[in-house]
Every structure is written in C-alpha cells, then in structure tokens.
C-alpha cells in the first residue's frame, strides 16, 4: 500500500499547491461496498474511498453526482477532491466533514434544502451517465416520458436482473402486470424533472457540528421528486419536522402514498438482487398491494 498512499500525497500536493505527508491514517466503518479512510497531515484532513481498479467509473460518477448537487447551491455535500487508480486500486477523495446525527433543526433545514433542490427546473428524465445504486448499475439514459423511464430503466432492469438470479414465478408475473398498468398510478399527476439524490436514506445524511445538514453517497438522476421523498420513508429515521418543512415548501400531489410504494419497490428489488432473502416476499407484497389498488 506504500505506493498507493504516496500517490495520494502527490495528488493532494498537485491540487492544493501545498506538500502533504500523511501523518495519520484511520480506517472508517459504515460502508459495505467500499473501504474508507481518513487521512491527515495533522492540519488538513481528507476522506478517501477505495475499491478495485475496475470500479473507477463508479467513483467518477459519484464525483460528478456530488459536483452537480453542489452546483445547485441548495444542499451541502462533501466536495470531490479527485479520483484515480494507484497500485491497482481505484480511489475517490472527498472533503472530510466531521458529521453528527442531525437534530430537529438540522432536519428541518434538510427538508427545506431538499425542497429547494427539487424546485429547480430540469430537462428530461435520466442523467448524462449511468451510475450505481449500491453495488448495482443504475441506467440513466434520458427519456421524455417519466412512466416509460420508470417502467424500463428502473422496474424493468431490476426485474430482469432478478430473473437472471433465479427469482422467477410470482415475482416476475406480478412485475410484468404492474409494469403494464403503471399509468393508473399517475392519474392527476404529471411529474416534472427534478434533480434527485437518488439514494436518500438516513444513512446518507448527517449534520455538521454547526447544525448544517449534509447529504452524501448520492446516485443522482433527474426524475419525479416524490421518488426521493419516498425513500426517506422506506427505512425510517427522518422526523416529522423534516417532512413538515418539505411539504410547507412543496406540497405533495394526490396519490403520493401509492406512488411511494411504487418508488420504494425499486429499492426493495435492488436489495433482493444484492442480498436475497426476505426481500423477495416484501417485493411481492408491495406489487400485490399496488395491483389491488389498480383494480
């Protein structure tokens, strides 16, 4: 690893114009996909993700995602400092932000910030490049029709992946019936494109010591803003103050509870493809619920 850390020292010197020698190197937990480190010269500190060299494109996409979120000037994200390959390992370097769990005020601010992000107009559903949702590729080729985008790029892709992993039978039958009837969940709701975080669960948000909310680990694309809000409810962890602040700025359309299930189905299918087990039954229950509501 000596050559690897030396390469990072040289990179920091190149981008900051100041020599950098690693004095402290601490492995960090919390992630199941990448290895993470905090490196410091005693004065400056950076956050580094490490994975196999073949995964550099996902780090490039994450850096682009963070830069695009930062450009909106609505939400705080760690600034990307660079990425590359050294000693046969891909790396992504970010600004190091000491984070704490967000309190009520920080979560209120997060709700307002998310609403401000979603309020900025965008063109087209998708993004200019594919990225990843967890360790699964996420396809983002642009589409003018949101329902078609969700049918093909989200549900269709995950169902095809599930079939290749041997998850067939009722899961696939219900999935195809649901895909054919998606229009029925959008009566009276015509989404306009918004820039989404894309993987907005409580493990991907925090706050600074000053109470400023921070988002990280995005999987951005442009889509229905409800998809971001839905995921905050999938695993819990967001207080009512967050939702109240969001709804005050951007009220939700009729039918959101049904579409929340639809949008979270994508993430449950992804968990099935990544982890298996009980997620199959959960996905089948969600599809059965949606199909029942479409009768």
Image (tube, rainbow, N blue to C red):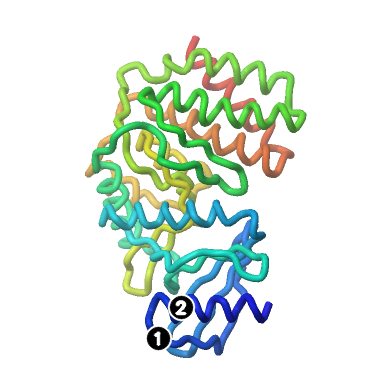
Q: Position of residue 54 (x, y in %)?
A: 64, 54
Residue bearing the label numbered 1: 18
Depth order, front residue of 81/226: 81
Question: Are dots 1 and 2 in contact, CB under 8 Å?
Answer: yes
Q: Residues within 10 Å of mark 2 (few under 14, many from 20)?
A: some
Q: Position of residue 3 (x, y in %)?
A: 65, 78
Q: Position of residue 176 (x, y in %)?
A: 60, 16
Q: Secondary structure at mark 1?
A: loop
Residue bearing the label numbered 2: 12
Among numbered discs 1 and 2, the one appearing first in the sequence: 2
Q: Residues within 10 Å of mark 1 (few under 14, many from 20)?
A: few
Is residue 100 positioned above or below 26 on the image? above
What is the spatial separation of the Cα atoms under label 1 and label 2, in whole angstroms?
8 Å
Q: Determine whether, in the image, residue 143 is placed left or right of residue 158.
A: left
* Residue found 32% across the figure and 39% down from its top: 194
Q: Secondary structure at mark 2?
A: helix
Q: Quadrant of residue 252?
A: top left
Depth order, front residue of 182/151: 151
């Amino acid at each position: 690893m000596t050559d690897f850390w030396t390469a990072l020292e040289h990179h920091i010197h190149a981008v900051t114009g100041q020599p950098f020698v690693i004095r402290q190197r601490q492995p960090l937990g919390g992630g199941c996909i990448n290895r993470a480190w905090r490196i410091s010269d005693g004065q400056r500190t950076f956050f580094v993700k490490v994975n196999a060299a073949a995964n550099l494109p996902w780090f490039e996409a994450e850096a682009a995602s963070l830069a695009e979120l930062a450009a909106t000037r609505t939400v705080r994200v760690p600034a990307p400092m660079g990425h590359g390959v050294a000693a046969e390992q891909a790396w992504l370097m970010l600004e190091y932000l000491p984070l704490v769990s967000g309190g009520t005020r920080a979560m209120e601010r997060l709700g307002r910030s998310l609403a401000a992000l979603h309020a900025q107009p965008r063109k087209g559903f998708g993004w200019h490049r594919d990225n990843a949702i967890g360790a699964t590729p996420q396809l983002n080729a642009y589409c003018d029709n949101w329902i078609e985008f969700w049918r093909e790029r989200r549900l269709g892709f995950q169902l095809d992946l599930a079939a290749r992993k041997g998850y067939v039978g009722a899961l696939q039958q219900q999935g195809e019936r649901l895909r054919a009837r998606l229009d029925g969940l959008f009566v009276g709701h015509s989404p306009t494109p918004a820039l989404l975080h894309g993987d907005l669960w409580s493990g991907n948000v925090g706050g600074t010591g000053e109470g400023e909310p921070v988002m990280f680990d995005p999987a951005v694309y442009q889509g229905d803003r409800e998809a971001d809000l839905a995921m905050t409810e999938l695993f819990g962890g967001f207080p009512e103050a967050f939702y109240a602040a969001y709804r005050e700025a951007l009220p939700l359309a009729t039918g959101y509870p049904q579409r929340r299930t639809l949008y979270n189905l994508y993430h449950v299918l992804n968990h099935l493809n990544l982890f298996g087990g009980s997620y199959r039954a959960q996905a089948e229950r969600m599809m059965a619920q949606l199909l029942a509501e479409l009768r």
